[in-house]
Image (cartoon, rainbow, N blue to C red):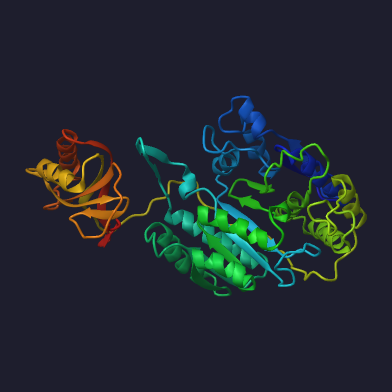
Amino acid sequence: MRSKVKVTAIPGDGIGPEVMQATQQVLAAAGAQVEWEEALAGAEAFRKGIAAGAPQETLDSIARNGVALKGPLETPVGYGEKSANVTLRKVFEMYGNVRPVRELPGIRTPFSGRGIDFVVVRENVEDVYAGIEHMQTPGVAQCLKIITEAGCERIVRLAAAVAEAEGRKKVTVSTKANIMKLTEGMLKRVGEQVLKDYPSLTHEHMIVDNCAHQMVIRPEQFDVTVMTNMNGDILSDLAAGLVGGLGVAPSANLGDEAAMFEAVHGSAPQIAGKGIANPTALLLSSLMMLRHIGDFATARRIEHALYVTLEEGKDLTGDIARDGEGVPTAAFVDRIIANLGRESLNVPDREYRPIALKKWPQITWYRAASTRELVGVDVFVESERDPRAISITLQAAAEGSAFDLTMIGSRGAQVWPDVGGHTFLVDHFRARFMFREPPKGNGIAEITDLLQRIGRQHNWMHIEKLQRFDGADAYSKA
């Protein structure tokens, strides 16, 4: 007998407690050696005034056990508290989100019969989801897109490890590198370099909007695709729609110290408490959890029981029942349990192996540059004036300083010197100042002097140094 593995169970909100109970029932009937430790997160935590949506007791439980199974959580939209889901991922640095997309028997979609079977691997803690936002003027908001070389390497190596663990052959790195050449471009560059270490895998790069298009036109071409956080968030949901939607979509969040497996569908408060919720997404997520802890046999047994149940088309919940008239959650669970030990002959078997996660050292990652040059500074100013008038005041401010004003931009478009065309103007301008001569030290004194000069006539809100690393410009052009 295997010794029991303690797992933190977070039932969540809305239908969460119902699908959690259903999942635990099936696992128990199949003999899964799991001991549950229930914990709180989501709406109830917010109501208690816990701004992060997860109390310390829950964080302690996950830290102790290293494995969690989580139902859907409610998150305030557009105001107030952080997302509890994002909090849990970031606290435990669960940097990789793994979303299998597999055609299920009996689930009819416009793509049925195509044999869809691929995995979306999404970077989980960086990008705009770092949540670093500022109101720069009363009418202009900024969100910082943080992409790191280390984060790119981690997620690409995870994608390769997933491919190897599942016997897959190809990894598609999908980015918006044609537009965001430094941030999205970093994933492209790092991905191409890292995947050279995996000669058994073929790899390709695909622009992310084309990737969305290709998922709908020819989804069979994909095996494993890896993306930055926001792109992966959107396209993993699109991919789930190909095979039946979020109600049947499993998910895993993986990191060095903890793993959390979750249903990614909503909490569906409109049907909570009615006993009609479909637990398939959380059940499939629990199978990913069982494989993570090494119980491949029990995962396979439950998986086939579910497949047989879906193939028979009997005792299904209303959202997947063929006649549209479903049965209660309990009857669906009973049918799956009754089918334990039976095997589907229609679903191709996939042999799973442990995912060989690289252990990342607990150090501050640092990328050294052979050469580093400070060549200028972008100063963001608030003004209701037109670009020409702003240029006159900023040129006057720069007179006698170490800088020349070379460009003013608005929302990424150059508005001075005038290059023609028409740009809708708002009160937020980026003024680019370049050093006339390389500074002798770190340039701080010169920058401070410039800001004091600008501040006499303009409200500036933030600056960015313009640097060159190893002889290459480390900033975008207008």
Q: Quadrant of residue 356?
A: bottom right
Residue 234: x and y in percent read 56, 55
Does the image show residue 222? no
Does the image show residue 62? yes
The quadrant the C terminus occupies is bottom left
Using the image as rendered, state which of residue 445 and residue 440 is in the foreground: 445
Residue 180: x and y in percent read 39, 59
Residue 346: x and y in percent read 82, 71
159 relative to 314 in the view: left or right: left
- State whether residue 146 is above or below residue 54: below
Q: Quadrant of residue 379?
A: top left
244 relative to 187 in the view: left or right: right
Using the image as rendered, state which of residue 438 and residue 15 is in the foreground: 15
- State whether residue 72 is above or below residue 167: above
435 relative to 330 in the view: left or right: left
Farthest residue, direction top: 48
Using the image as rendered, state which of residue 308 and residue 438 is in the foreground: 308
